[in-house]
Amino acid sequence: MIIRSVFAAVLGLAAVLLAAAALPSAWLQRNVLDEAGFVALTEPMVEDQGFRSELSAAVAGDIGRQLGAQPALAAVAAPVIERVAGRLTELDGFPEAWRESVAASHRLSLADPERPELAVQAAPLADLAVREVAAGLGVDLPPAGNLTVRFDDAGLGGYLAAAVRAAAAWSWLAAGAVVAALAAVLLAVRKAGAVFWLGAGMAAAGLLLWTAAGQLPALAGRVSGAPLAGAFAARLAELSTEGFQPWAAVLAGAGVLALLAGLVAGLFAGPAGRRGSSR
């Protein structure tokens, strides 16, 4: 009986740990590794004034560099570029250009899944601004071409590679958590007690994950690179926190429900149920 209880406890702990790993892995797969999910996650990014300012500055700087070889035109174009860049998010076609930019950034960052490198590709947005500037000046301007903004933090690639591996394994982690939890309950001498402690573990795991997600903005502040890269990382961290914390809350809530179910089942079992389990 003691051996059964020990094995049940080990399996219960394994179930909690696997569930705690499966949840963020599943979220990463759906919202970061999947291109459509990443585009949806970053859609509210341009609502932030700070990020819009850095994006406009990067686009304006790229157009200015293109015109650097034509000093006379550059002098005339400067106020037009400033005006267009300042209202970049209001231009016709901005939503489509933003989605194209995010999708291109996603493909660029994960071009090599074994060695991912987070980068921002703002060329579609720059092209949109270039067309608006050309229309304002009444001249033909070449497309922006490549406007890649990379992150200088070498350690970031390691975290991203770990996230890719975890996301790929989320289904196995989730299946392992379910199997371990069922085995723990079946093997336990007191089934209600096993459900109670599994619930307590899940609730604690959900709370810890919720708290950990809240630290992402602080970690993003340590990312170095161009101003646009820093603004992108900061806003992405905020959106990731907002997106993942409800998932963690669901895990914690499910754990509380399981805890209460185990408690109620134990109370209804009463002394007779406990005596029956001890025989």
Image (cartoon, rainbow, N blue to C red):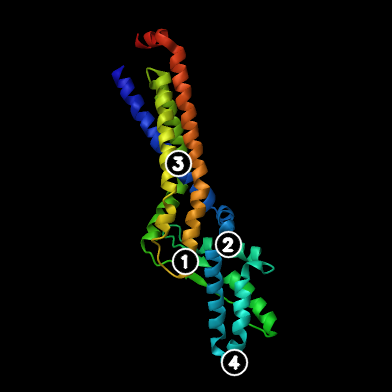
Up-down relation of residue 246 to residue 116 (above or below):
above
Q: Look at the numbered disc 3 and give the secondary structure of its residue.
A: helix
- The residue shown at (56%, 59%) is 45
- The residue shown at (39%, 55%) is 159
The residue at which mark 4 appears reads as 72
In space, the residues marked 3 and 2 are separated at their CA atoms by 30 Å
Q: Do the residues labelled 4 and 1 touch (CB within 8 Å)?
A: no
Q: Badge 1, how many Cα within 10 Å: few under 14, some, many 20+?
A: many
Amino acid at circle 1: Ala
N-terminal-most mark, 4 or 1? 4
Closer to the camera: disc 1 or disc 3? Answer: 1
The residue at which mark 3 appears reads as 22
Q: Badge 2, how many Cα within 10 Å: few under 14, some, many 20+?
A: some
Q: Do the residues labelled 1 and 2 touch (CB within 8 Å)?
A: no
* Quadrant in which residue 154 is drawn: bottom left
In space, the residues marked 1 and 2 are separated at their CA atoms by 14 Å
Q: Would you say residue 142 is visible in this rendering?
A: no
The residue at which mark 1 appears reads as 229
